[in-house]
Image (cartoon, rainbow, N blue to C red):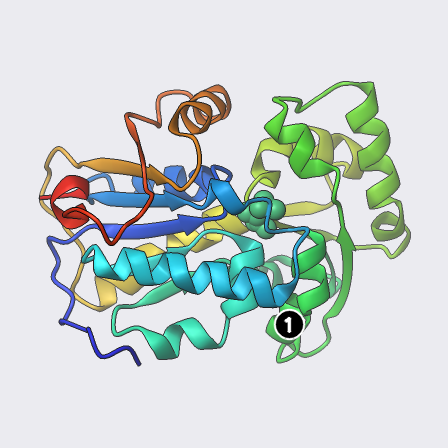
Amino acid sequence: MRPDSDPPQARAPIGIFDSGFGGLTVARAVMDQLPNEDVIYLGDTARAPYGEQSIADVREFTMECLDHLVDLGVKALVIACNSGSAATLRDARERYSVPVVEVILPAARRAVATTRNGRIGVICTEATATSMAYDDAFAVAPGVQLFTVACPKFVPYVEAGITGGPELLADAEAYLRPLKAAGIDTLVLGCTHYPLLTGVLGIVLGDDVALVSSAAACADSVYSVLTRAGLAHDEPREARHTFLTTGNPESFSRLGRRLLPDLITDVIQFSEPWKGDWRERAWS
Ligand code: DGL
């Protein structure tokens, strides 16, 4: 465990980390459930996409960003990024004294509770598929058969603002064909961007396949972890949401606003975090 560790306080913000702005799907779900909580969101846009990089690099980048959030005084860490969660699943909980919630275990638990025939599909980035993190998460569930497909074209579609149209439909059909052939009845959306593709996924798979969003499952887990730890901010108040990016704040705002209108306020560039009083700027 890092030596820094002050005990977390209920009035401190929740820290949400993602490789870029896709984790705003998780942030939105967390803010919907916990409207009184201050949130600091850190997107490592300068080094994204993580999904195409080695697990070792994704692990290093993720830990570095989580360290920054802990240094800002957050009371809990949310790893919104599936690739980042896959790369740090074991280590992050041991490293920090604040509670750590990631996306993979909550999604796996929800999928197990949802499936009727035990045949579960996972779609995700290459990094998440290679890590086998979902295989590990499902290993303890008796009678479950897992079918994983990496869908590298989906993130660029979403980032280009494309969530429909014939090309995307054709790619979705190609990616999902083996999962349909395997007879899955439940599909885990194992990437931050995929909740924005539920329309096309639903058309390809039909009503008999349940879609499990790792973003929604993660937000439920954040709620219960904070409540159980006595760290929830229950009284009604105007919450403060701070968005930090290691990349260009204008493009982060533009993309974020296009995909999730009304969520983003100002975006601050988070560079050289060792300079200046970030705790003061991010929340006070
Ligand atoms: N946030 C990543 C994930 O959920 C997707 C975007 C990226 O590849 O950086 O895996």
Q: Position of residue 28 (x, y in %)?
A: 38, 37
Work out whether 271 lies above or below 122.
above
Near-viewer residue (143 or 77): 77
Q: Is residue 182 left or right of residue 42?
A: right
Near-viewer residue (250 or 151): 250
Q: Could one spot residue 86 in this view of the protein?
A: no
Near-viewer residue (57 or 168): 57
Residue 73 position by quadrant: bottom left
Work out whether 65 lies above or below 205.
below
Label 1 is placed on what type of residue? Phe
Q: Could one spot residue 9 in this view of the protein?
A: yes
Circle 1 is placed at which residue position? 138
Q: Which residue is drawn at 64% across and 51% down?
A: 51
Residue 97 position by quadrant: bottom left
Q: Position of residue 200 (x, y in %)?
A: 72, 29
Q: Position of residue 237 (x, y in %)?
A: 10, 36
Q: In this view, does 89 lie to the left or right of 30?
A: right
Work out whether 181 lies above or below 197.
below
Q: Where is residue 164 in the image (x, y as percent from the top left)?
A: 71, 21
Q: Which residue is drawn at 58% across and 57% down?
A: 83
What quarter of the picture does the C terminus occupy?
A: top left
User: Could you say whether the residue bearing mark 1 is in a helix, strand or loop?
Assistant: helix
Q: Is residue 230 left or right of residue 200?
A: left
Q: Residue at x 21, y 49 (%)?
A: 275
What quarter of the picture does the N terminus occupy?
A: bottom left
